[in-house]
Image: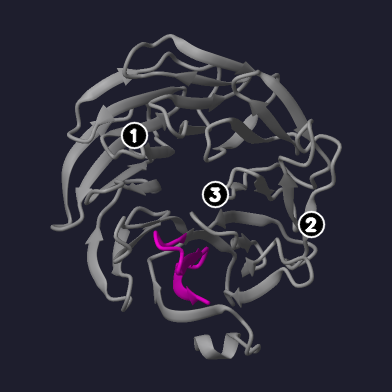
Amino acid sequence: MPLSSLFGRSENRLRPSWQATVSDHAISLAWSPDGTRVAVAAVSGPITLFDAASGQVVHSLPGHGFGTTAIAWQPHGNLLASVGQDGRVRLWDTGTGQAVYELDAGAAWAEKVVWHPGGQYLAAAAGKKARVWTATGDLVRELPPQAGTVMDVKWRPGTQQLTVLAYGAATTYDPLASSEPVRVLAWKGSPLAMAWSPDGQVLAHGNQDATVHFWYFESLRDLQMWGYRTKVRELAWDYSSRYLATGGGPVVCIWDCQAGPKGPEGSKPQMLVGHDEETSITALAYQARGFLLASAGLDGKVLLWQPLNRKGALIGEFRFPEAEASVVAWSPDDRSLAAGSGAGAVVVFRVG
């Protein structure tokens, strides 16, 4: 189906630049720091590097046996990190398309990989373990085993601290200094995904029990939001650290974390209705320096929102015709949006 047939509104601000395909379900997507390339991982393993302007294939990487689970592009560099169900971490030279380092993640499968914003350190999660390496593949530290499978790892903004999310707690370490925790945010439950506010002050995690938990890191004050239809894996902060967008059903909920002295506690979120009623959100992404928000859903829709424009928040729409929209990511300059589907379709839009 041509892209033009999927766009019926002249005011639609999702303008397609190109469409391509990967071998199957697009599970992870990453832009190069200069915005000239887009990497897309297929769940079966292969990773494809596209020219961001034309959609032409630059490199096809084998990825991981048994399947690739996540990719991350090195900030300020040309290394692409990937992890997979073979228990390996691979660093690829995106200029040559060759793997330059292969690292042991510490368990039979690895699911998460994340670069420190400075680009000099890399963390990955595998089973109950999290490990940190330098960009040249030297192991810095293996952190203590967690109580359950590590569901997420994130660097705390503005620091060299790494937060590890697993059953019962979000535990923050300074892996360059010690294996001892800096802070343990204990919670009796099964968290699934987390997001740090850009100012590094608030940690939010979505949970198996259809709630979202907020932690104010310095004061240790916490609060919880409930009423979601499904478990919550989708979280995205805006650049100002004021608004948190969450999934957990067909409606995008946006919490104003500066609504009052108690933050969002007791307030009502802004609710963005546009995805089909019987679906669920699969991904959320705010611009790095703007207020536009992209959402993806099991209904195949990629929607563009301007949440602060309450009279007409929905400003762009696209629908994959054959499968769910699985991933979305903004380009470094916030002018383009890339999206992938469960059928392996990849689309890059100009936004404006």
Name which quarter of the figure residue 324 lies in: bottom right
Does dot 1 land on a helix, a strand or a loop? Answer: loop
Of badges 2 and 1, nearer the viewer stands 2
- Scheme of colours in the image: one colour
Q: Nearer the viewer, residue 138 or 351?
A: 351
Of badges 2 and 3, nearer the viewer stands 3
Residue underneath mark 3: 239
| Residue 89 in the figure: left or right of residue 312 | left
Q: Is residue 18 magenta?
A: no
Give the amino acid type for the residue marked by disc 1 in the picture. Answer: Gly
Give the amino acid type for the residue marked by disc 3 in the picture. Answer: Tyr
Q: Nearer the viewer, residue 277 or 270?
A: 270
Name which quarter of the figure residue 272 lies in: bottom right
Up-down relation of residue 256 to residue 252 (above or below): above
Give the amino acid type for the residue marked by disc 2 in the picture. Answer: Met
Q: Position of residue 16 (x, y in %)?
A: 48, 80
- Give how far apart the Cα atoms at labels 2 and 1 are: 39 Å
| Residue 326 in the figure: left or right of residue 307 | left
Counting other residues with Cα less than 10 Å from the Cα at mark 1, is it few (<14), some (14-19), or many (20 or more)? many
Residue underneath mark 1: 87
The numbered mark at residue 113 is none
Q: Position of residue 184 (x, y in %)?
A: 57, 15
Residue at 22% in and 36% down? 135
Is residue 106 at all visible to an observer of this figure? no
Residue underneath mark 2: 271
Magenta region, residue range? 330-352
